Amino acid sequence: MPSDLETKLEKYERKAAQCEKAAQEAKDEPGRAFYKGLARYYDELATDFRQVLAKRTAASLAAE
């Protein structure tokens, strides 16, 4: 069963991918820039969650 952090990580990865797709499909430069910015934001959130998960996994392994 995935943890809450893993669920959020997947959510932000999915949102980043959706925004990247929307940026590619945008008809004008402001629209592309908007969606690229959102994709970058969600990707940064996903990266933060990956780091937290890695730290928790390392701490859990060290405790064993």
Image (spheres, helix red, strand yellow):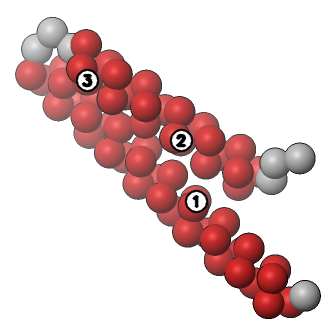
Identify the amino acid type marked 3: Ala
Q: Of residues 64 and 16, which is closer to you in this image? A: 64
Which residue carries the number 2 mark? 12
Q: Earlier in the sequence, mark 2 or mark 3?
A: 2
> How far is the residue under mark 2 from the one under mark 1?
9 Å
> Against 13, is 23 above or below?
above
Q: Earlier in the sequence, mark 3 or mark 1?
A: 3
Q: Is residue 22 left or right of residue 59?
A: left
| Number of numbered discs overlaid on the protein picture | 3
Q: Circle 2 — which element?
A: helix
Q: Circle 1 — which element?
A: helix
Identify the amino acid type marked 1: Phe
Q: Is residue 44 left or right of residue 11?
A: left
> How far is the residue under mark 2 from the one under mark 3?
16 Å
* Quadrant for the C terminus in the image: bottom right
Identify the amino acid type marked 2: Tyr
Q: Is residue 54 left or right of residue 64?
A: left
Q: Which mark is residue 49?
A: 1
